Amino acid sequence: MTRHFLRDDDLSPAEQAEVLALAAELKASPFAQRPLEGPRGVGVIFDKNSTRTRFSFEMGIAQLGGHAVVVDGTTTQLGRDETIEDTGRVLSRFVDAIVWRTFGQDRLEAMASTATVPVINALSDTFHPCQVLADLQTIIERKGPPAGLAMTYLGDGANNMAHSLALGGVTAGMHVTISAPTGFEPAAEVLEAVRARAEQAGGSVRVVADPATAVAGADVLVTDTWTSMGQETDGKDRKGPFRPYQINDELLAQADPGAIVLHCLPAHRGEEITDAVIDGPASVVIDEAENRLHAQKALLVWLLRQ
Ligand code: CP
Ligand code: NVA
């Protein structure tokens, strides 16, 4: 059975730990593993904008000895209605893995249904699991083993980052709090999966509307844009309801004194996070961005071994 990474719970807790250990090894010795030597290829398709994901996958694949075919999805025949299923069948004859940033999670599932090589979610509307591997690597570097740590995410609780932090966080045994305004809570079916995984892995999840309550005692604070890609014209008022969820000095002071602050970037400074916090001593956002490279290389190496 081909293994895919479409959502955070596609790796068991033990498998996630293996990938994170490998990520740390590859950070220390970037050229130690060359499973794509040949070169073997990886297809990297973007249906949405990207800076970090594009650079980290393309460079990571090169460092593993392979070749990345990086394309804008609209310029492929997918943009002219070739089926996702046929695309999965065909690309599997050319490349050893398919990395795809797209809209609906169902599109990734359709690709994985026919691809005979691993399909990796490089961000969908529902999940951003590669980002959360990098986030966990960053948390481990700063705070040690993640199991038992308290992580609070503030902002849009229904977006890809909230969902993946909850699912990936409990997989690592973390206690995850999602703090979001009414109407922006995590999707019920995702919360159900998070609770099931938490039970298995020893973590927990809660949804807390009040930001001060949510951050009390937190070891890790995380936020993300209030308006995700694709939501720019949905007509929802976000600035008003989201304002109390901004990570600023006052909110940070209510977390654990040693708390670190993560943001997957790009940041909207002055909205979800202030300049003082993102540029301040608690912020680890640039290390977090770098870890995309190491975590994704580890994921590729691990998937290609299965
Ligand atoms: N964090 C992240 O995925 O960044 P990009 O959109 O720049 O790839
Ligand atoms: N939630 C954001 C993440 C960007 C990396 C978005 O989907 O736009």
Image (cartoon, grey):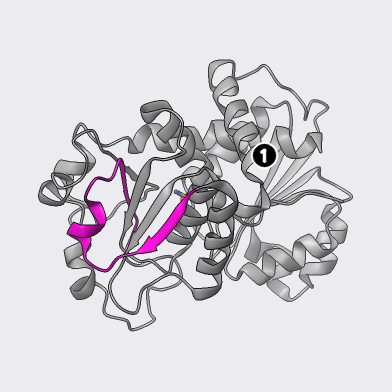
Question: Quick one: quadrant of the C terminus?
Answer: top right
**Quick check: 147 left or right of 233?**
right
Q: Residue furthest bottom?
A: 235
Q: Nearer the viewer, residue 31 or 187?
A: 187
Q: Nearer the viewer, residue 250 or 45?
A: 250
Q: Position of residue 79 (x, y in %)?
A: 68, 70
Q: Which residue is mark 1?
A: 15
State how many labels appear. 1
Q: Position of residue 90 (x, y in %)?
A: 87, 58
Q: Is residue 16 magenta?
A: no
Q: Residue at x 34, y 43 (%)?
A: 262
Neighbour tally class for label 1: few under 14, some 14-19, many 20 plus, Cα within 10 Å: some
Q: Which quarter of the picture shows residue 300?
A: top right
Q: Nearer the viewer, residue 243 or 54?
A: 243
**Quick check: 68 left or right of 150?**
right
Q: Which residues are magenta?
A: 203-225
Q: Residue at x 65, y 38 (%)?
A: 14
